[in-house]
Amino acid sequence: MADRHPRVLIPVTRARTAAGLLEVAAGILRRENGSGLLLGVVELPQGRPIAQSVTIARRYRSLLQRITELETQVEARYGVQVRVAGSLSQGVREAAFENQADLILLAWPGLGTSRPSDRNIEDLVADPPADLLLVRQDPSGGGIRTSDGVLVPVRGGPSARLALRAAAALAGSRRVQVTALHVHDPRHSVDKQQRESRDFRQMLREVSRRRIQPVEVVAANPSQAITDAGRHHGVTVLGAYADASRSSVLVGSRLAKTVQALPGTVIVAKSSKAVPPIFVDEPMPPIMASGADVSTVVDKWFAENTFHSREFRDVGRLVGLKRRHGLTISLGLPTLNEEATIGDVISTLKGDLMDRTPLLDEIVVIDSASTDRTVEIARSLGVPVVQHSEVLPGHGSFKGKGEALWKSLHVLKGDIVVWCDTDISNIHPQFVYGTVGPLLADSRISYVKGFYRRPLNFGGELHATGGGRVTELAARPLINLFYPVLSGLVQPLSGEYAGRRELLERLPFFTGYGVETGHLIDIVENFGLNCIAQTDLGMRIHRNHGLLDLSKMAFAIMQVAIKRLGDRHRIHLLEEINRSMKLVHYHNDRFFLEVREIGDWERPPMGAIPEYLFSRAPIKLAN
Amino acid sequence: MGEPQSPLEIVPSFRLIGQNLGGSLLLNGVAPFVAYQVLSARGVPVVRALALTSVFPIAGLLVGFARSRRADAIGVISLVLIAVGIAGSMNFGPRFYLVRVSFGTSAFGLLCLASLLYRRPLMFYLGRQVSTGNEPTRAAYYDALWQRPRFRQVQRVVTATWGIGYTLEAGVRLLVAVTLPIGVVLLVEPIIGYVVLGLLMLWTIRYTRGAALEASRPGLSSTPAN
């Protein structure tokens, strides 16, 4: 347990034990002002296709989400995460590592019986990735009875300190007394007993500012003494002492027998520091599935990090999360001649997500010199419009969407930045809350990509499949060839995405259509796949581009992918490659060759721009 | 469709379910479901959204009653399930929430069993709707069948079977929810639902057809004695 605001990981894996865990968690979180993470683990033996568990992961997530909403008795800060792993212990280990958990709350397995699935948490207990509290619910049913105080039998060692802290937190949250019990061995000399007694009282003073009632007894059978004392207390917190052998702690050990004999709620504390050094030489269980093939990594990512905008439709809850984390959110709308759709896009998003519920703190249109009424319409709806060429004038200006997005990062003030394309004709608030939601719900996620079904507007008819031609014909083959870890992204080129500023300001931006491809490659290579998530945004209807436009897009995307491929191998592939593209037109029975410069230029990370750093430092958007 | 000539014509089948239940299912099942989705998408709290969806079955019941003087059984079931849904969404703490699915299906099972205490069991009304679509001449024929002891017995057996089936299903769900890891429960629960519903429907169709065949065998009166 860290000294301040511990991050508590609570694997909620069985309905029967969940309530007891949550009760203990609530007490500790309230007292120590920590944050909790409800963890769901979908166990999937090796070899079974993981992607099938997407639906289960989603339902698991909603279930846990709902539980956090039910837990109104505390102002607790619960996050929710669902992982797919070969075993429960693997999932817990990964989550503890990724979320830097200080404390893990687990259900004491078995409740008297031993099931095979419980055995796999043995290794978690033997070598915990963080401090561990194992909670054995009151076998007589019902919740925690703290009315008669909390008992902590103390023998010493790091686990004893953890036990005392946990007991103090639990008792403190319920305003009851903690009694620390030390059992002296009658065979020890009076001198040794006195020394132990001094150390015992010293430890109590160190651990908690609150007064802990010390009780010392002399007994030949310490387990019996503890059990006797436990009968007068609703809750007993035991420190697990380091066992020289790595034999089972949970079944058959003296500790297990004591736990079984004790009435009421029993919490077994095991400090991560309590593992004797003898274990260090042993191979650690892998934290990440190392050596796993790319396909497994992608499948696992897909199952864990694919959300649905439905999960976030309660915008009020998102606003609550936003306030709790003290974040601000900005929406950037890049435009280029979007008079047909921009009005509807702005009024829908502003009305629903800013005026009615304050999810967004600002909306700014970043225009690329539209020649139609786009700017006029946006201004009439009360949204500021910025010409991207006028932002950071000292750095010049390129044409292209990526350039507009890069500049918008300087203009927008929020801690989370969301971008949404403005050519969508079936605009719905989910296009924004769907990509913001995972960022608010899960702190390990930093970049969220929207995906959708794209009906192709073909001759006035909507075809449910098709669309995303650049994705399927250029981006996806390239990604699968050179960046297969990204192959789980359904729509790598979608224009609806959101990111944390800390991440975005560290990313270079390509100035044209390659911006999204560049983002994904740079994020996965520098920050890892697990900070990317994707959200299902349902159906999206938008203007379809002509084939020549798509050809240019594909060109830009390939350029970016190849540039990054060269960077990876430290060779300059692109110097040998044409930056311009010849587009073939056919007109009046003749072919024309049009040469177009489609070079995507690379903008440095915004965090490296002095004007940006200067403007960011003093200004913080008021909430 | 004129007046049925034999009980065989009113034996429930998948064709009749589609034909006669379509409208009612649309009103009492699909409409509340869609309304709930729309309302909760608009951020309406779960309990209030559920309460508002009850407008559809209530309206259906009132209109149906005014028109044919017969209560729409599907409407009643829909209302009960909405009520159970509201109860299940209330905050009784996580202990209750994790096993709440079994309460919904046990409600239906218990509703069936409780209806056995009354003059006519629930499946009589449900069956009438399935077989006749509450169309007056067919419904009158169906009602008249109640005079036959065998028909009464069949209705009671069917109701008891669905009641026991769904109460057991709820028990199995509860057992599964308590003993298995949540990841497995979420996988298994929908399967339990479909399997039980499918089995009960198949059994009901076969059982009632058998009974109707028996009744229309020569030597037995094929017209209701009314």
Image: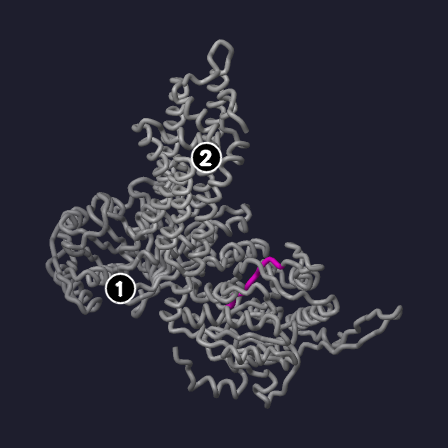
Which residue is identified by label 1?
A30
Question: In the displayed structure, would residue A403 be above or below residue B69?
Answer: below
Q: Which residues are magenta?
A: A447-454
Which residue is identified by label 2?
B197
Mark 2 chain? B
> For residue A88: magenta?
no
- Can you give x and y, in whole percent of width and height, for residue A256 in the image? 27, 46
Residue B70 picture quarter: top left
**Left or right of residue A283, residue B160 in this image:** left
Q: Residue at x 50, y 16 (%)?
A: B216
**How are the residues colored?**
one colour
Q: Residues within 10 Å of mark 1 (few under 14, many from 20)?
A: many
Screen quadrant of the C terminus of chain A: bottom left
Amino acid type, callout 1 = Arg
- Can you give x and y, in whole percent of width and height, for residue A519 in the image? 58, 71
Q: Which mark is residue B8?
A: none
- Can you give x and y, in whole percent of width and height, for residue A216 in the image? 12, 57
Screen quadrant of the N terminus of chain A: bottom left
Callout 2–callout 1 Cβ contact below 8 Å: no
Q: Residue at x 42, y 80 (%)?
A: A621
Q: Main secondary structure of the magenta part?
A: strand
How many marks the image carries: the answer is 2
**Left or right of residue A563, residue A298 in this image:** left
Q: Residue at x 61, y 59 (%)?
A: A487
Amino acid type, callout 2 = Leu
